[in-house]
């Protein structure tokens, strides 16, 4: 477990209390810079850990966190395969595979 500052702990605690059912897309807009930063990382579990750490500050909902991870992975695929003509379809297939896999266990 990553050690967090007291401020981050308090923010996450307040978020768990007040934002459990918030399903807005602000988490997705905030993770796009992460996707760019992470585009050379190949460890999916590490990518998920980083994405969840960012998203859980304002979105304690596990489904939102896992969807943000899937979104980032699809975006990374698009960035890393910019010359591939069928990259959109393959990014979608990757997202679907990840959503059904163990790294996104709460997504139905």
Image: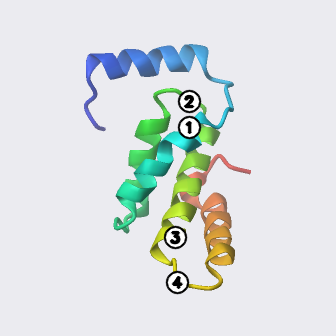
Q: Which mark is residue 83?
A: 4
Circles 4 and 2: CB atoms closer than 8 Å: no
Which quadrant of the view contains residue 64?
top right
Nearer to us: label 1 or label 4: 4
Which dot marks residue 77?
3
Q: Nearer the N terminus, badge 3 or badge 1?
A: 1
* Residue under label 1: 27
Q: Helix or strand or loop: what does disc 4 sit on?
A: loop
Task: Please provide percent x and percent y for residue 72.
Answer: 52, 56
Name the residue that disc number 2 marks. 59
Seen in the picture, residue 19 relative to 103 is either above or below; the reply is above
**What label does residue 2 carry, if any?**
none
CA distance for labels 4 and 2: 34 Å
Task: Determine whether 58 is above or below 45 in the image.
Answer: above
User: Mark 3 to mark 1: distance in Å?
Assistant: 19 Å
Q: Residues within 10 Å of mark 3 (few under 14, many from 20)?
A: many
Tell whether 100 sits left or right of 31: right
Viewer-side label of 3, 4:
4
**Of the residues tagged 4 and 2, which is closer to the observer?**
4
Question: Is there a contact, CB below 8 Å, between mark 1 and mark 2?
Answer: yes
Kindly report which numbered mark, 1 or 2, lies closer to the viewer in this rendering.
1
């Amino acid at each position: 477990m990553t050690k967090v500052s007291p401020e981050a702990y308090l923010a996450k605690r307040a978020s768990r209390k007040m934002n459990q059912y918030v399903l807005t897309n602000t988490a997705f807009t905030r993770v796009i810079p992460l996707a760019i930063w992470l585009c050379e990382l190949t460890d999916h579990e590490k990518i998920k850990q980083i994405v969840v750490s960012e998203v859980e500050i304002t979105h304690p909902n596990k489904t939102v966190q896992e969807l943000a991870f899937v979104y980032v992975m699809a975006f990374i695929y698009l960035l890393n395969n910019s010359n591939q003509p069928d990259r959109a379809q393959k990014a979608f297939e990757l997202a679907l595979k990840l959503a059904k896999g163990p790294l996104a266990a709460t997504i139905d």
